[in-house]
Amino acid sequence: MSSSIVLLPNWIGDMLLSLSVVMRLPERRRSNTTLLVPGQMSSLVGMLCDLPRIEYSRSDADNRRRTASVVRSGGFQTMYLLPFSFSSAWFSMKTGIPVRRGLSREMRRFLLTDPLPRDVINTNSKKLYHITNEYAEILDTPFSPPEEWRGINVMPERNHRGSIVYCPGASYGPAKKWPYFPALALLHERYNIVVLGSREDRESAREIVQMAPERITDLTGKTSLNEAAAIMSSARGVVSNDSGLMHLAAYIGTPVIGLFGSTSPVWTRPLGKRSMAMNFPEPCAPCFCRTCRYHHYRCLGNITPDAVEEAMENLLGSQEFQFDAG
């Protein structure tokens, strides 16, 4: 069977959702598949799957040329472009790979040898199906519902075993940031809490820590993605905004509550049966905006801490998902 290479998306959440589709390819195809991975996520992908990978460095023109040369020397017959950008199609053309398959978005149809309709599943304005539908179409493989993902084993970090992890950040913008993590920390009085995120999330973490400094640990800006995965692997559960860390928790199979504001849980709900997406219907949502055009953020603000606490207790209390304290 001819070999293929799959270009993964640059955003962590999209990358993990697409990786879940790649990992469910039939074995005969997976054994002939190489991943082209954004450099900053190469180590994480190495932890999460056993497929060969090439780092895609795109910081400048010289790095892009070097990556294209490495890919060109691999003798691949097909490239599957999971990102929807023009730049990814331009890069694929530079590799000279004979078959380049992707969606005809961003005016890139002429760069693809196997272009798919731009609206093969969803339209830009109406995202009615999970994004993994689109990835399955690009990869020419049957669609598997996201809730059927079973997670993978990651070696757990023991120091915070049994904690609840909070992920209060979202690089996309305030329309994805739930404001009530501090109040939730008071309701989670029976648990130790670990706060994960980037350095930009430290102010949010500080507000949470103030609620109960004796049982809340702030690790924002202090962990790699691999370390965050190990911490979440040992956690009792995760509460997160719609972010890359939410998708990482779901990918490894940790029970997770995903909080959705301006984005759509229909389109990017977290993977697995051990996950739950929470949102509050508003006439203007999902708008997919970074900030609320009406300045009220009700799609997030109407998700109450009590509702999230109850949802987490129900998720953790299920017989199927009892936490192993051993």
Image: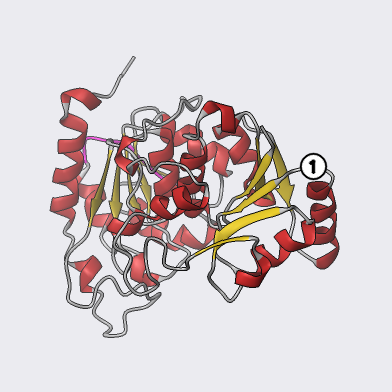
Q: Quadrant of the N terminus?
A: top right
Task: Name the spot of residue 267 as percent of width and height, x first.
Answer: 34, 58
Reply above or below: 40 against 114. above
Residue that label 1 marks: 75
Colouring convention used in this rendered image of the protein? secondary structure
Residue at the spot 58% in from the left edge and 67% down from the top edge:
85
Most frequent secondary structure within the magenta stretch:
loop
Residue at 55% over, 37% down: 227
Q: Residue at x 57, y 55 (%)?
A: 9
Q: Nearer the viewer, residue 116 or 176?
A: 116
Membership of 192 in magenta stretch: yes
Front in this rendered view, residue 59 or 169: 59
| Residue 206 sits in quarter | bottom left
SS assignment at label 1: loop
- The part of the chain drawn in magenta is 189-197
Q: Considering the image in quadrants, where does the C terminus appear?
A: top left
In the figure, is residue 63 to the left or right of 28? right
Relative horizontal placement of residue 124, taking residue 294 as reference (left or right): right
| 128 is higher (above) or lower (below) than 257 | below
Q: Is residue 30 visible?
A: yes
**Depth order, front residue of 227/77:** 77
* Place of residue 169 in the rendered image (x, y in percent of width and height, measured from the top left): 42, 59
